Image (spheres, rainbow, N blue to C red):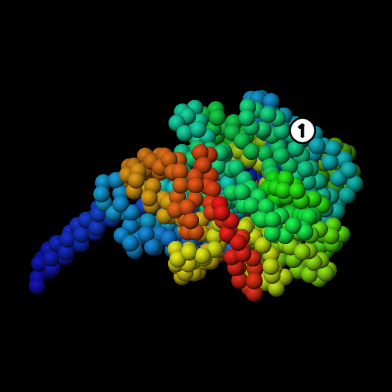
Amino acid sequence: MDFYLGLLQIMGVHTLLGLSAYVVLLTGQVSLAQAGFMAIGAYVAAMLTVLSGWPLIAALIAGALVAGFMACLVGFPALRVHGLMLVVATLAFTEIVRLFFFNFDYQIARGSIRVGPLGGEGFRQIRYFPENGWTTLHVAIFIWSVVALVMAALWWMDRSRAGAVLRAVGEDEIAAQSCGINLTAVKVSAMTAGGAIAGLAGGIYAHYTTHIEQTNFTIMVATFAIAYPILGGLSSIFGTVAAVVFIQGFLIEGLRFLGDWRNLLFGALIVLVMNIRPSGLLDARTMATLRRLFGRREG
Amino acid sequence: MTITRLIASSAVAAIVTAGTSFSVNAQEREVKLSGFGAMSGVVRSFGINSKAALEAAADEVNKAGGVKLGDGTKGKLVIEYFDDRCNAEEGISVARRMASSATLVGIGPTCSNVAEPLFGILQKKVGDAGDSGLQFPVFTDVAIKVGLAKISDWAFRNVPDEGAMYRALFQWIKKTQPDLKTVFGGVEEDFAHSRATWYAVMKEVAAKEGFEVKGEAKWLLADTNFTNQAREARRAAADIIAISAHPFTTCGMLKEMGRQGVKPKLVIGLTSSSSLETLQGCSAEAEAIIIPTSFAPVTPEAQAAAERAAKFNGSLDLHSGAAYENIAILKSVIESEGVMAKPDTVQADRAKIRNGLAKLTETKGLIGVSKRTPDREAVKPFLFVHAKSGKWEVLHTPTN
């Protein structure tokens, strides 16, 4: 049981990571900066609980706010570039953040040991959960409560005017602008919201793994972040969840028994799924079918 | 034979067979031990070799009659091995999977960046009711970064003490080659072990022993181009080049040094590079490199163990040699602590094994006796090997 609860924790954090990219993708921007925002959230939240003794929730919120603020700063210059250039620019940001933490030392003495980030050797002993008696079940429930809150907020946004505006910008920027939509405000807002969600994911990640280092926030994490919503489909937030379950639950954990073959199958199965479901696991048609099944008509 | 008699005799046969198998099971229970490490990626050879060593050692124990359990019955060691891809999240997931099963001990991981978070999710102080960390013993064979076992009372390691090894090596160099005065480092920066070994061990020890450290060239685990680093090494013109990197980039650096004509008087390598991979990757360029190691087939036990591991498609080196030793150590702990290996005693058995491991003050290894420290680390015997004509040869055996 502990194993499945642990797996739920991993899926929860990856769902947040995927949702952070989902918001940005709605505006038609492809960002590889999510790993950088995640790293910022992870280090800020961990430093606040370990070094300053903050309660977890306050530390997570602070981590998300700092990551969101950084995303807002990145959003403005990133607006000047589009498409592949934006991908390169955001990738560069992730690398800058990773290298910053690679060289970032800030340790304080606690009794006979020193705690805090120590450059390339990482930041250990982020043991808020076990030290406060949180069981695996408690942690899983907490993580999925946060995921549920974020999903509810995004679901509400998606159904509001804000969601329509984001999608309009994503579909056709010029048409959206001609309708009076402020592209700068929309894109920067999406980047900020995405950054804050990624920061939240990072804060939780730091606390359930108990140790973070710069290698946890590489281009591979950024790639996963955008892979989840793309593979799951942008029609609904539930597509991201479906993709996380497929990748983390099936490809990584479910196929672990295959050993080396798992890595070969990993890529092949993703390509296969994308060919079978080019618009994502839960595309607009599937979502409409599901809505009909659950007794709701398309609006 | 009528249908009725056929059915009746089949039923009797089935009952007898079931009874026999129950009797066999009752007399020989399974003692499940799980290994885990990198079976894929750049450092996959470590996982492959550890898996082979664990299977070879367990096979040897089982052939010799298995392990004696607490109630006098015999137990058969069963090994399963999980790939964690040298990834922290996957390592934690694998640990939770093992802890959720009948596995009594986890043996691994390969990478220190997996060991650190993994030890972090274990209960820090044994018996601390306020700490909800996993109560699952882990007996590490490979992850070698200095001082990790102190993270949790449930973490044990059978890895060499690199501080002692390199101190002895630099002292020996100072004594036998007094004309060598300067050291330049080469460090694989993004790998926890190699980075820590250069900055916290090699560099410090060299300076303490009176060598002038002329700086270091840095690269990453996945790097394939070492032009600048070799140029830096040439510019430093040091007597000794100490490379703190794994076989893949050690070979890359050595090849580039050869291409640029960088010829130090002595090259020192990282403990983990005293493996077959280095010789397979750059035998000619690695000629004469000196590495301290805790394994070489210098005793009959070590030779026999290496042969057995080879039958399981693995190569025994200082890391997989430790995996092999771990099985022998665990066998003696299981027997001395009266482990039962029953489905309803799993957690109690884990606690017994933890306590048994914590009690050890020394263990018998493949090349000699290792001491156990209060913080659950090993002080293993070691020797210096050098690459000669495509083989590792013992150069010197310090009195350690």
Taking B282 as reference, is B343 left or right? left
The amino acid on which the numbered mark 1 sits, given as a three-letter code, is: Val
Residue B215, given in percent of the width and then of the height, sits at 81, 51
Decide if residue A280 is on the left or right side of residue B60. Answer: right
| Number of numbered discs | 1
> In this rendering, does residue A115 appear at all?
yes
Residue A39 x %, y %: 72, 41
| Quadrant hosting residue A185 | top right
Residue marked by disc 1: A66
Helix, strand or loop status at disc 1: helix
Quarter that holds the C terminus of chain A: top right
Instruction: Name the quarter where the N terminus of chain A is drawn.
Output: top left
Which residue does the image show at 47% across and 29% down from the upper left? B128
Foreground of the two, A289 or B366: B366
Few, some or many residues within 10 Å of mark 1 (<14, 14–19, 20+) = many
- Measured from the top left, where is residue A168 in percent x and y? 79, 44
Tell me what residue is drawn at x 44 percent, y 43 percent.
B360
User: Would residue A29 be visible to someone looking at this image?
Assistant: no
Is residue B22 found left or right of B116 in the rendered image?
left
Task: In this rendered view, identify the residue nearer to me: A286 or A247.
Answer: A247
Q: Chain of mark 1?
A: A
In the image, what residue occupies the spot 20% across and 62% down? B17
Residue at 78% of width from left, 55% of height from top? B181
Q: Is residue B266 above or below residue A298?
A: below
